[in-house]
Structure formats: C-alpha cells, structure tokens
Amino acid sequence: MRLRIILLIVAIILGVIAVVAVVSYISSIRTSVEEEVEKVEVLVAAQNIPKETPVETIIAADAVTTEAIPRKYLADGVLTTLDNYEGYVTAAPVNKGEQITSTKFVKPEQ
C-alpha cells in the first residue's frame, strides 16, 4: 500500500513537470512567432517615381504610401517619413511597391 502511494506521488510530480515543460515550450514558440510577425509602418512607392524627382513633388503627388511590413522583410535604411529629405531628389528610378530607403535620395547637384 505504501509503495502505491509513493508511486502515485512520483507520477503526479512527473506529470506537473511535464505540464510546466510543455507550457514553457509553447510560450517560447509563441514569442518567436510574434517577433517574426511584428510589422512596421514604412514608406512604399505608390507609383513609379522617375530619377531626379524632388521629394516635394513626390509628397504633393502622393507617390508614396505607408505599408505595414514584417520587420524581418525590411530593407536596410527603410524610411518611415520624408520629413528630413526636403530639398533632395531621387538618385534612381523607384518602382511601384518598392520600399523607400535613404539611399534612394541625394542632394541635387548645383
């Protein structure tokens, strides 16, 4: 009888440990999935933008829009606003749907 009680207690303890391990594992998976799916609002070309187009023209023509992109798919130097680029022009053509990055703009030659 005493052996059965000890085995029952050991089984309960092992069951609790198993439940804690499974909950911990599921929590870590959820965290990694949430990080992969985390989205950031960035600027994306709403239309094709020719080379040497001034930023002011781009803004006036609504040539860019914001789009939520998963963080792991963001281009290096992607922009969330054009506020600091007044007086700049596009360095090369920008295709519709392309993420707007800081390398797309240069100061115009005088």
Image: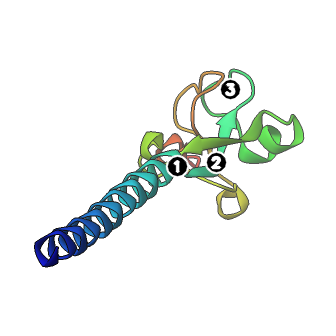
Q: Amino acid at mark 3?
A: Ile
Nearest the camera: 109 or 56? 56
Question: Residue at label 3?
Answer: 49
Q: Amino acid at mark 1?
A: Val
Mark 2 touches mark 1? (CB < 8 Å) = yes
Nearest the camera: 76 or 10? 10
Q: Is residue 99 left or right of residue 28?
A: right
| Place of residue 14 in the rendered image (x, y in percent of width and height, measured from the top left) | 22, 66
Question: Residue 54 is drawn in which quadrant?
Answer: top right
Q: Is residue 83 left or right of residue 72?
A: right
Going from the N terminus, do you reach mark 3 or mark 1 first? 3
Q: Which residue occupies 11% across, 73% down?
A: 3
Q: CA distance from mark 2 to mark 1?
A: 7 Å
Going from the N terminus, do you reach mark 2 or mark 1 first? 2
Of circles 3 and 2, the one toward us is 2
Q: Amino acid at mark 2?
A: Val
Location of residue 23 with respect to 99 vertically, above or below? below
Q: Residue furthest right?
A: 60
Nearest the camera: 55 or 95? 95
Q: CA distance from mark 3 to mark 2?
A: 17 Å
| Place of residue 27 in the rendered image (x, y in percent of width and height, measured from the top left) | 42, 60
Question: Residue 67 is drawn in which quadrant?
Answer: top right
Question: Residue at label 1?
Answer: 78
Give the secondary structure at mark 2.
strand
Give the secondary structure at mark 3.
loop
Question: Residue at label 2?
Answer: 42
Q: Mark 2 packing: few (<14 Cα in 10 Å), some, or many (20+)? A: many
Q: Quadrant of the N terminus?
A: bottom left
Nearest the camera: 35 or 86? 35
Q: CA distance from mark 3 to mark 1?
A: 16 Å
| Place of residue 77 in the rendered image (x, y in percent of width and height, measured from the top left) | 46, 52
Going from the N terminus, do you reach mark 3 or mark 2 first? 2
